[in-house]
Image (cartoon, helix red, strand yellow):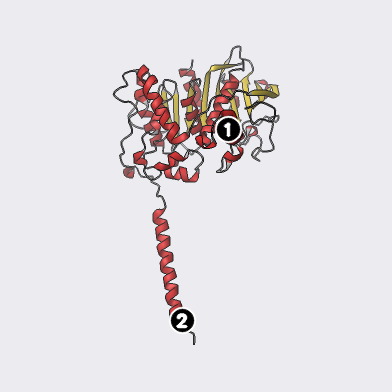
Amino acid sequence: MLNIIPILAAMKKILFFSLVTLSLRLSAQEVFNYDELKVGNLPLPAVLTPAVKNAADWQRNRRPEILRLFTTQMYGVFPGKPPHMHTQVQLVDSNALGGKAISKQVRLFLAAGDQAPFMDILLFLPKESKKPVPVFIGCNFLGNHTVSGENNILVKKVAHPVALGFQERRWEVARLIENGYALATYHYGDLEADSTDGWKTGIRTTLQQELKTAPDAWAALSVWGWGLSRLLDYLETEKAVDAKRVIATGHSRLGKAALWAVANDPRFAAVISNNSGEGGAALSTRWYGETIERINTRFPYWFTDAYKQYNKKPETLPFDQHMLLALIAPRPLYVASATEDLWTDPKGEFLAARAAGPVYALFKYEGVGVSEMPAPDHPVGKRIRYHVRTGKHDILWYDWEQYIKFANEELP
């Protein structure tokens, strides 16, 4: 007769160790917080030091120190303009958007030759303007063909397989044109795919000799932001555009990229961060919504490896995102959140914008102008502006209305 007692004992051991293992795994899993009472009160790193007495001190000493921190500890380097860039106009439509606009599609080669890595630019210009126009620029997520429903927008074979004009409502091209603004965009995947191995086929590899920059010296967010600077290079050659009034915009992860681009490139006139959250406009040391550990685990290629040392030690971070926002000064800065977008920590975005105020004050500009987070759909501030829109993680016409008003007031 089979003796089942040893078998049962072995099964009990297996069950015991399985439960212990499960318990350890659960205890090791990160917990996410959405309760303000549990946030804690970690002090923010000082954006100003006693040695900074005026704007000149900031520009000469403190600003370079902070930029160096973000470069070495978070985003990586931001290379300069490649020496052999050149363009090829692919298509011009003088009657776009029902005759109200001119659209141009331009291939920007990032090195010599017609086989070089490239980014495809889509530009819409107001047709009736008698003078160079200001322009909103930003990366798009799913391909140029998704930004507008115009049926002559070129679709690359590698483009995301979604419909023409799929994200048209996020760009409001026709309304921007009606308000006297141009729009320029490129697909962020032209430079690096948004994936762990994207760097292997992206420009961090294909342009490393041209840029004299090792792939691990920068990360994906820096790459996508770098693309905005190259788009600005092109716009400086476009006579219909006022290159002194180029406003970088970005939603979500591309808002992070836009902030980093403008922090590095003084040619940008202003920047708009729409729901950029952790690693963008939100304070990283606040325990609310997405965390450093979570973003580095889920998207390890967005930031350099140096940033991972803070995964479990956010309290040791020698900087925070209010200092990134301060790098924009004295240029106009707009930070926008959404009430239901708790993952991006709307209050953390507001607090970061508020904490950048002392640097703007050095230049005699007013910041958000309030100490408490405003009610939904009530924008606050002047040179630094903030709103929290009712709704989800998105960019809607309400947001664009505020951005147009902001640009009209701050970039006359």
Mark with earlier residue (2, 1): 2
Label annotation for residue 4 = 2
For label 2, the crowd category at 10 Å Cα-Cα, with few meaning under 14, some 14 to 19 and many 20 or more, is: few
Residue 194 x, y percent position in the rendering:
56, 40
In the rendered picture of this protein, how many numbered marks are placed on residues? Answer: 2
Of residues 370 and 221, which is closer to you in this image? 221
Amino acid at pointer 2: Ile
Residue 260 as seen in the image, left or right of residue 107: left
Res. 252 visible in picture:
no
**Percent x, y for residue 297?**
47, 46
One can see residue 294 in this view: yes
Q: Which residue lies furthest to the bottom in this view?
A: 1
Q: Distance between the residues labelled 2 and 1?
A: 65 Å
Q: Name the residue under label 1.
A: 208
Q: Is 129 situated above or below 390?
A: above
**Mark 1 neighbour class, 10 Å CA radius: few under 14, some 14 to 19, many 20 or more:** few
Residue 237 picture quarter: top right
Which residue corresponds to the image point at 31% horizontal and 42% vertical from the top-left?
40
Can you tell which quarter of the image residue 171 is in? top right
Query: Seen in the image, is 396 located left or right of residue 376?
Result: right
Q: Name which residue lies at 36% across and 35% down.
A: 318
**Of marks 2 and 1, the one in the foreground:** 1
**Vertical side of 53 occupied by 70: above or below:** below
Rendering coords of residue 65 (x, y %):
39, 27
**Residue 201 percent coordinates (x, y):** 61, 39
Classify residue 139 as left or right of residue 332. right
Q: Which amino acid does label 1 sit on?
A: Gln
**Quadrant in the picture for residue 44:** top left
Which secondary structure lies at badge 1?
helix
Residue at the limit of the structure toward the left, as seen here = 50
